[in-house]
Amino acid sequence: MTNQKKLLKMLVLSMLVAIGVVISPLLRVEGMCPMAHFINIVCSVFLGPWYSLLCATLIGFIRMATMAIPPIALTGAIFGAFLSGVFYRMSKGKIIFAVIGEVIGTGIIGALASYPVMTFLWGRGGLSWIFYIPSFVCGTLIGGSIAYVFLRKLADSGLLSQMQSMLASKCYQDKSTLLSNTATIAAFGAILFVVVEVISDMFELTSPIFDILSKASLVGCIVLAGVYYIFKRVKKE
C-alpha cells in the first residue's frame, strides 16, 4: 500500500470517527443509538473489520470522556463493528451480511457483555442478562437499514467499488437483486421511523399521533416491500 493510500485511509477513518461522535447523540431514539451502528457498517464496508473496530473504540472513548457516557458506549459498539466487517468479507461483499454482523455483534453479543460491565463496573442495579437485547437489536436494525440503503445506492452506481479501490480495501461487486430491492424498500421504513422520532423529540411534540406515525411508516414500508416481492415473483413466473 502506498503512503498516499495509507494517508487517505487515515483521513477517512478520522472523518468517520468525527461524524460518529457528532451524530450519535443527536440523531438518536430513546434507548437506542442507530447512527452509531450506521457508522460501524459503513466503516466495515469501506475499510474492513479492524479499522471498523478501531473506529468504534475511538468513538466510544471520546464519548465516554467528553459526554460522561457509561462503558456501554464501548460494549454497545465494538463487537458489532468487528463482526460487521468479518461477515462482509466472508460473504464476498454482500452488504446485507454487513448489517447482519452488526445486529448479531451489537444486538446480542454486545447486549450480553453490557450486563456485567454496567452491573459490576458501573454499579447499576436492577438489570438482567437480556435487559439490553431488545433496545440494542432495535437500534441495530434501524441503523443497519439506513446503512443498507446508503451502501446499496453506492454499490448500484459503481461508486462503492471505486471508493474501496481508492482506499486499497477489498473490492466487491454486489449487484441488485429482487431480494435486495425488497430489503431496500423495507429499510426506508426504518429511516422514516427515525426521522419522525427525532423530529418529535427535537420539538418536544408529545401528541400520540407522532408515535403512531413513526410506527405506521415502519410497518407500511415492510408491507409494501412484501407486496413488491410477491408482485415481481408472480410477474416473473
Image (spheres, grey):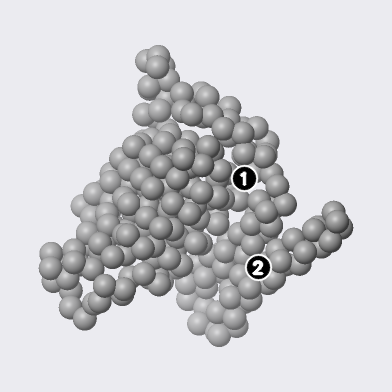
Residue 32 drawn above or below residue 215: above
- What residue is shown at x 32% (from left), y 60% (from top)? 109
Image coordinates of residue 221 in percent, x first then y, are 67, 67
**Most distant residue in the bottom direction:** 208
Nearest to the observer: residue 156 or residue 236:
236
Nearest to the observer: residue 30 or residue 185:
185
Q: Quadrant of the C terminus?
A: bottom right
Element assignment for label 2: helix
**Most distant residue in the top direction:** 2
Residue that mark 2 sits on: 222
Dot 1: within a 10 Å radius of its alpha carbon, few (fewer than 14), some, or many (20 or more) residues?
many
Q: CA–CA distance between discs 2 and 1?
A: 17 Å
Image coordinates of residue 190 in percent, x first then y, are 57, 64
Horizontally, residue 159 falls left or right of residue 85, namely: right
Image coordinates of residue 125 in percent, x first then y, are 18, 78
- Dividing the picture into quadrants, the one containing residue 129 is bottom left
Horizontally, residue 92 falls left or right of residue 114, namely: right
Whether residue 210 is visible to the viewer of this picture, yes or no, is no
Disc 1 marks which amino acid?
A: Arg
- What residue is shown at x 43% (from left), y 47% (from top)? 84
- What residue is shown at x 58% (from left), y 75% (from top)? 215
Disc 2 marks which amino acid?
A: Ile
Q: Kindly identify which numbered label has been placed on residue 152.
A: 1
- Dividing the picture into quadrants, the one containing residue 3 is top left
Whether residue 84 is visible to the viewer of this picture, yes or no, is yes
Horizontally, residue 222 falls left or right of residue 83, namely: right
Residue 173 drawn above or below residue 200: above
Q: Quadrant of the N terminus?
A: top left
Image coordinates of residue 12 in percent, x first then y, are 42, 33
- What residue is shown at x 42% (from left), y 20% (from top)? 5
